[in-house]
Amino acid sequence: MRTPTDFRQRITEYLEAVTGGVVEIKSLQPLAGGASRDTWLIHIHTPAVDERLVLRRDLPTSIMDSALERDQEFAIMSAAHVAGVRVPQPRWFCSEPHILGEPFLIYNYIEGVSIGAEVVSLPELAEARRRLPEQMGEQLARIHRLNPALFDFLPRPRPGYSPAQEAVLQTRAALIRLGVHNPALAFGLRWIERHLPEGGEVVFLHGDFRVGNFIVSEEGLSGIVDWEFSRLGDPCEELAWPCLRDWRYGSGHLRLGGIGEREPFIRAYERASGRRINRKVVDFWEILGNLRWAVTALAQANRHLALGETSVELASLGRRSAEMQLEMLRLIAEQGV
Amino acid sequence: MYDRPTLSELLDAVRAHLEENIIPLLKDDRKLYYQTLVAVNALRIAGRELTMNALHLQDEWARLNFLQNSADSIPADDDEARAALAERSRRLCEDIAAGSYDQYPRKAALFEHLLATAVEQLQVANPRFLQILALEDSERERRR
């Protein structure tokens, strides 16, 4: 493992190389990140500017099948930025392993709060929470307009399969791979198969659009981060995903991410996108979203159990799967078993 | 027979040590602080499992008997009981996938079993989650 001084030195050298001038790192601190990623806030000073940047780096052992590479994430963030999506402006990416050991990307820091539990509860964000549902709808419409043809590397439903059918295939494959025989998950999968919506449009999806991946300031939604799960899929899937109970951070009565109601969000999305959204299809995707997250939680635990990534955090996720299982069952009951 | 502390007392001693002596030292390292909170919670889960496991095994077995119209008795040995239960769950999954529970009333009976099993899991893994759900449900009832 490298020493912090060495880490700092290497980042300084890298930034001096890409900016072509003297760079002084005034501070370097870790930010809360995902289980597979390492995120740092870097405050730099150069003769020209004084600015704050964020560095995101893969962890050496991260094994998320569906996650994108850093250069792909960089390309997507750049396109989203150009298209007027509120995304931190990406600056550089580096895939040279000799710099920091793993590929990384650097983007501009945006001031605000991203930790879900704080977004749903901080008193100073009350006005932001009031604005968020509409802002989320407008932003999501912009994201879904990104041209998929620009990103031939994105995961997508295989030919002849709708996004929902693709999700069923993937979920079943994951259960087999994990060797899991859980009747609630088997039942959820069966219910989904028997209630598949007709057709379904295929658009660019952020892939993890929810509270927790938003930088929220007092004005509301200031930045959308974590583009590593971008893919092509059904727009209704991404209207349902931010409604999952697990992204409500304890404010469970507020269906949209613990900050508001679902309806203003969907209405804003309809206005901005020109699409008419069938609420029943969004309900379907919320059930499927819980099923997938329940299976993903088991897959994360499996990284600890079988794939050599010792982590109490990953291990504990296995026991959280039941939360999504119960939520899925309750939502199915609302639709009629 | 082992001398005290019992298994749950040992778990509790480790948990108290982490909570009282270690976590306060970690406030400046967010990652380690969070991971240690998760570790403390894992010890709580283990403690609850110790007290509830036997009862949950019995209940799940009885529910499966009812669901599958069977009168099998549960193996006396805990490990054997767990293995037998896992095998029954595996077969239940196959039956579900094959469509054996697509129609009423079997579908409703299965659903009750699944709901009960998820609740039992959460009584061990996260009882607070269940409390919050109950609170939310009664709040919604009240507003109706």
Image (spheres, rainbow, N blue to C red):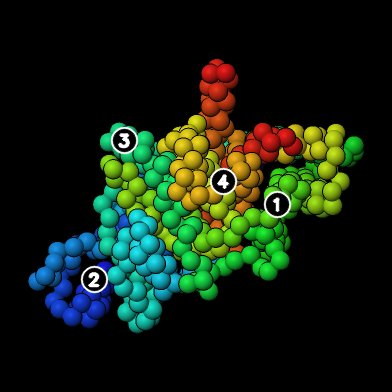
Other-residue count near label 3 (Cα within 10 Å), few / some / many at <14 / 14–19 / ≥20: few
Tag 3 and tag 2, C-beta contact below 8 Å: no
Residue type for callout 3: Glu
Query: Circle 4 sits in a helix, a strand or a loop, which is it?
Result: loop
Between B36 and B99, the one nearer to me in the picture: B99
Residue type for callout 4: Arg
Q: Looking at the image, is mark 3 or mark 2 nearer the viewer?
A: 3
What is the x, y in percent for residue B55?
70, 34
User: Mark on residue A276?
Assistant: 4
Q: Is residue A229 visible?
A: no
Q: Looking at the image, is mark 1 or mark 2 nearer the viewer?
A: 1
Q: Earlier in the sequence, mark 1 or mark 2?
A: 2
Between A299 and A286, the one nearer to me in the picture: A286
Q: Looking at the image, is mark 1 or mark 4 nearer the viewer?
A: 4
Residue depicted at x 68% and y 69%: A159
Q: Determine which residue is flagged by label 2.
A: A8
What is the x, y in percent for residue A5?
23, 71
